[in-house]
Amino acid sequence: MYMSEAKGLEYWVSTLTRADLPVLRQTARDLAALRADDKRLNAHSVAEVIARDPIMTVKLLRYLQMHKSRAQTTEVIQVHQALLMLGLEPVFKNVAPQPLIEEMFKMHIMALAPMLRVIHRSHRASEFAKDWALQLHDLHFEEVRVATLLHDIAEILMWCFAPDRMLEINAIQEKDKTLRSRHAQEQVLGFTLIELQKELAVQWRLPELLLKLMNDSGTKQPRVRNVELAVNLARHSANGWDDTALPDDYRDISELLRVPVAQVIDMFNTDADAARGI
């Protein structure tokens, strides 16, 4: 069922808070395979599967936050830690990998590809952020990776629950390349996706550290900056490695990593050559 009629921010916060969030078919398959294999079933192997799927990741963290004990005094962002705290069987029982994203889009197949592109972009950004965090000797690099993976979770969820509206936003932006995303979102939805995401984070009681890392506040704090730049690079390179915004991205990344711009460009030459078929 798609709720495509015009609704406000409060409606969508309520709807997405109550909704059973869908996951990728591959996630469900991989988790089912692990559950059927006692030799491979452990918190590490399950975490590897969940960590590739932004919606499954946020489902797990949301469930943990809603059911955490008074004894839990530290914030948990890492998937592996969440699994250890909850236990595998309770997770399989209460954070089931269903419904399936691909099933939801059977009646709106045109929106499936752009939604999957956002998920792919989020995953690429998370890998960029993890690599840079390691270069910066961040001992908690997994927190940065998860924050980057979930940076655009509201956009992914709106593709799932309001695909017609998201297609309309895409069409507006295709028609006017100079129009900023937030203006197109306000025009169609009446609010921006970042506003929706912030409200969802409050309702879902997501960890404060996660919210700080996901917040593009213009801060120079390295971990927050890492997330922001990884998201930018993934978004711009998705348009092709000749995107005009990439030189600025390379400069910003060089400042973050404290290496020459030429070295940053070399880091991505392989990807660029592969995209050109070289």
Image (tube, helix red, strand yellow):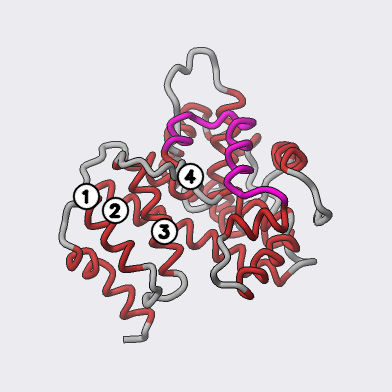
| Labels 4 and 2: the sequence-earlier one | 4
> In terms of secondary structure, where does tag 4 sit?
helix
Q: Mark 1 or 4, which is nearer the eye?
A: 1
The circle on residue 232 is 3
Q: Secondary structure at mark 3?
A: helix
Question: Tag 3: residue type?
Answer: Asn
Mark 1 surroundings: few (<14), some (14-19) or many (≥20) residues within 10 A: few
Residue at disc 1, secondary structure: helix
Per the rendering, the mark at residue 259 is none
Would you say 100 lies left or right of 148 here? Answer: right
Disc number placed over residue 46 in the picture, else none: 4
Residue in the image at 54% along x and 54% along y: 30
Q: CA distance from mark 4 to mark 2?
A: 22 Å
Front residue (pair 74, 100): 74
Residue 145's x, y, as percent? 39, 46
Name the residue that disc number 2 marks: 131
Q: Is residue 94 left or right of residue 268?
A: right
Tell me whether the residue at label 1 lies in contact with that at label 4, contact meaning CB atoms closer than 8 angstroms. no
How many residues crowd mark 4 within 10 Å: few (<14), some (14–19), many (20+)? many
Which residues make up the magenta segment? 190-212
Which of the two marks, 4 or 2, is nearer to us in this view?
Answer: 2
Q: Is residue 39 visible?
A: no
Report whether residue 131 is seen: yes
Give the label on residue 135, or none.
1
Specify the quadrant that holds the C terminus.
bottom left
